Image (cartoon, rainbow, N blue to C red):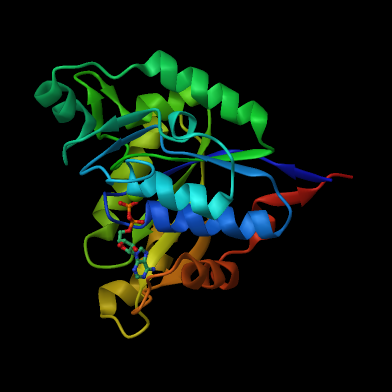
Amino acid sequence: MFAVKSYFVTGTDTGVGKTAITAALAASLRKRGIDVGVMKPIASGTPNKTGFKSSDAVLLHEAAKVNDTEDMINPVFLPVPTSPYDATKILNLEIDMKTISERFQHLLKAHQMLLVEGIGGVMTPIARNFFVADMIKAMGLETIIVTRSTLGTLNHTMMTFRMCKEYGIAVKGMIINYFDEKGGLAEKNAPSTLYEITGLPILGIIPFVKDYQKLDTLTSIVEKSIDLNLFISERS
Ligand SMILES: Nc1ncnc2c1ncn2[C@@H]1O[C@H](COP(=O)(O)OP(=O)(O)O)[C@@H](O)[C@H]1O
Ligand SMILES: [Mg+2]
């Protein structure tokens, strides 16, 4: 029997690879026999014409091979490409955090382990005075920070790390994405400097995959780059 925990996957920005890495992690853990559930509580953007409206939820659902419905995996979809708070202003609605919490609790009980993908970064507003960090705190999950390795990442990662500290959010570690071995000095130094100044464990360094299109490609790279045992421990 395995002992596993659930995690909230956040990032230093939008587009850092939260979905790609959460999906690849879910697929890898599923291959190891873990019943991993996935959730994208709030998504925004142009809806897909068929299937789940959120492309992130589609990928997560496909990766985890779960039977959960769209309502469970992605309770809130905002059909405008903005932050959740801006979307509520444009669409004149309020995000129903109670429903999100109920669906989250349901998925948490239904699976051995749950991976929840955030939206944007920790200070992305959901309401005027309610941020992604507040949602993480309410869920009581440990978080994983996905970050880039290119110039600017020290600033973004430090800000994310400091906000987690201020909110009292436990951070399991960082996953450094888009690492280019042939990159410049900033890129070469990023992993060691990020570790030095945050003290956060580096859970994995994922290379930039030139022709990355399919989930299988990133899954096999994630399996090579992240020690899955960091997420699984044998129950004695
Ligand atoms: N390591 C990588 N190499 C190449 N492309 C990647 C990598 N990680 C993510 N991507 C691509 O970058 C884009 C943004 O990633 P995504 O996971 O959607 O970010 P986020 O969820 O943080 O917004 C996607 O098109 C994704 O396929
Ligand atoms: Mg995403």
Quarter holding residue 67? top right
Q: Is residue 69 above or below residue 60?
A: above
Q: Residue at x 27, y 46 (%)?
A: 49
Relative placement, left or right, of 191 versus 139 is left
Q: Is residue 134 above or below residue 69?
A: above
Relative placement, left or right, of 104 versus 2 is left
Relative placement, left or right, of 7 versus 133 is right
Q: Is residue 85 above or below residue 154?
A: above
Percent of width and height locating residue 80: 16, 37
Percent of width and height locating residue 178: 35, 69
Q: Residue at x 29, y 19 (%)?
A: 95
Quarter holding residue 30? bottom right
Quarter holding residue 20? bottom left
Q: Nearer the viewer, residue 76 or 48?
A: 48
Whether residue 29 is visible, yes or no, is: yes
Residue ranking furthest to the left: 90
Percent of width and height locating residue 227: 63, 63
Q: Residue at x 25, y 42 (%)?
A: 47
Percent of width and height locating residue 160: 33, 43
Q: Nearer the viewer, residue 154 or 9?
A: 9
